[in-house]
Image: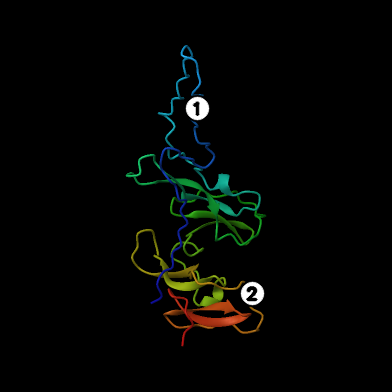
Amino acid sequence: MKALAVVLSLAVCSCGSTLTTSGDAANDTPSHDATETAGDVADPPPDTAGDAPDATTGCTTHEECLGEDYSGYCGPCGYWSCPCDPAEDPVCSPDCMPNRCHDGTMPVCPMPPPDCEDWEVLTVTGSCWSCLNLSTCMPWGEPGCAVDAECRVEEYCDPCASGSCPGCEDCVPGCADHGCPTETTVDCGMVRPECGDDGVAVARDGCWECVLLGSCEPMG
């Protein structure tokens, strides 16, 4: 069975005497000339006790992340904030992220955006609104693909991309990133082949080549 390829992009934070988070400038402690006269009293450094980064919520609903092209959603782990204490774990917070299920259309149907469940993502597909499983880009329980040719060139049809319901341990196929280097277009006129349980076809030199999932090495 093909292994599920999961790609997580995490912001790397460094903790120390100076800490800068997205949108926040580092606090500089004022320096004082060593030639100050004895009667001069140095200004106290600014109070930075309350300046530790917190898990500020970047979004609360999918609607506020749609954008002009309707291609965003509110991801539950959109960004990470780094505490000042290096011994503490980073804090995961919601923020707007690109919605891989959006098909590029604009909503023209008369229905308003529905209220999706917490485990669904609000998406525009076929010029109307849908509440989908982000792992399969289909309603929960429905397969997102049957063969690799139904997925984008940077994806493959993972036979166990999701379960039929949140928390279900069965398998429902869906398109997932394969993580191998690939070109974006194929011009050889060949239909994308199936490369077995351990392989995936990627685009190289304008055509398809079967490589091993995981190592991305050509299949012998």
- Assess disc 1: are there few (<14), some (14-19) or many (≥20) residues with their C-alpha within 10 Å of its C-alpha: few
Q: Nearer the viewer, residue 177 or 100?
A: 177
Which residue was labeled with disc 1?
A: 31
Q: Secondary structure at mark 2?
A: loop
Q: Residue drawn 44% across and 32% down?
A: 51
Query: Looking at the picture, how far across and down is residue 49, in whole percent?
Result: 40, 28
Q: Is residue 94 above or below residue 102?
A: above
Q: Residue drawn 47% across and 76% down?
A: 216
Q: Nearer the viewer, residue 109 or 21?
A: 21
Query: Position of 76 compared to 190: left or right?
Result: left
Question: Could you tell me which quadrant the N terminus lies in?
Answer: bottom left
Instruction: Give the number of callouts.
Output: 2
Query: Position of 94 compared to 70: left or right?
Result: left
Q: Earlier in the sequence, mark 1 or mark 2?
A: 1
* Residue 185 disc label: 2
Residue type, mark 2 in image: Thr
